[in-house]
Amino acid sequence: MRRLTGHVQHFAWGSHTAIPGILRREPDDRPWAEYWLGTHPGGHAFLDDGMALATHVQENPEVVGAAARAEFGDRLPYLMKILAASTPLSLQAHPSRQQAEVGYARESLLGLHPSEPTRSFKDDWPKPEAIVALTPFEGLLGFRDPLETAGLFEALGVADELASVIGPLRDRAAAPALQEVFLDVLSLDERRHLVDVVLAAAVNLLEAPGALGEFARTAVELDEHFPGDPGILAALLMNRFTLQPGEAVALEPGIMHAYLRGVGVEIMASSDNVMRGGLTQKHIDVDGLLQVVRFEPLQPTVLVAEGADGVYVYPTSFPEFELWLVSPVDGSHLPVPRSDCGRIALVTAGRFVLQGDDGDMHLESGDSAFLAADEDVTVHGEGQMFVAASGA
């Protein structure tokens, strides 16, 4: 049982206050977008003696756990984060394990350096992920039924002017229609004025009830951050969702998504593989999108933690990770789950005491700890403590 300090990522889309507030630190003039807890080389977490957690795992691989080591080798397979978005992130999707292995091998044979901006596969790992809302959390996830989207463009009053782009939504089967329109939008070039056509109509329908108002507001909100970007039209093909605190979504490989705003605890496979599909200045790999993205209608599924008596698990099915929520009731002492593998515990609210063979560890909001495999730890206190573990 070791106290852990994470790594802050100051990406431009981050909130200036949310993560400092959770960590009980003073904000500075920079955005605090993510707080990483894991062994990812892009942002190491450190133990209380100053050693990187990655080094500790490398020197003591038994802390990972037998099942996780058998599945993934001597590494921690997950990365846990606090994510705080004040502006929208890019449209993106992540590969499956097979796609990542093939893509990484191909780009390596081509001699592309891992830091090369045009490289899509930075490693040979998949990147499934899940996020649990700490505040109301908004995003885009998966493609809406194309006929429904066609109806929304018609209700917006722009279907005739956009016919050359959105026509396939009514004329073709769902999957080929979504693929054709999405990829066409990314190469509008001389037809970029069509984005302005949509926005001019949308500003007059911001207060419209139901799906039409949400459709219009999504277009206008994205234009505030990505003026005239064709990716706005790509985003309008997607479902918008809102999570309340404690609710979650899980993202399987190939699912296009974008987080818009909010604060949450995110867990993912420890990978850098991102296929961007719009609303970004970074490289968009069209061939990679064709290989990875699932161009099919999908309704977002909101997950809630399952369990009882203060110990709950979010129902995901990824081998790389599992996410638990510990929230004791009536001062009870609870076992920290998954003692068969290495875990990271993160307190996001309240105060907790972890008790193990080495004594007690007091954790408050923003504090975290690494618990080794085969280390039995109990916890009591009040608030919220998330526990990341291997899914194997």
Image (tube, rainbow, N blue to C red):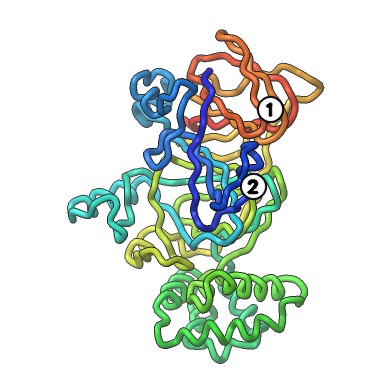
Q: What whole-number distance in Å separates the C-alpha atoms at marks 1 and 2?
A: 26 Å
State the image coordinates of residue 274 (x, y, percent, origin top left): 41, 54
Residue 77 lies left or right of residue 382; in this view the side is left
Identify the residue at image location x=42%, y=74%. 186
- According to the picture, the residue beneath numbered tag 1 turns out to be 311
**Discs 1/2, front:** 2
- Residue 282 location, quadrant: bottom left
Q: Secondary structure at mark 2?
A: helix
Count residues near mark 1 (Cα–Cα under 10 Å), then give few for <14, some for 14-19, many for 20+.
many
State the image coordinates of residue 327 (x, y, percent, origin top left): 72, 29
Q: Amino acid at mark 2?
A: Ala
Identify the residue at image location x=49%, y=19%. 372
State the image coordinates of residue 132 (x, y, percent, origin top left): 63, 44
| 212 relative to 385, above or below | below
Q: Secondary structure at mark 1?
A: strand
Q: Amino acid at mark 1?
A: Val
Query: Quick one: which residue is furthest to the bottom in this view?
Result: 160
Residue 161 lies left or right of residue 307; in this view the side is left
- According to the picture, the residue beneath numbered tag 2 turns out to be 18
Residue 61 is labelled as: none
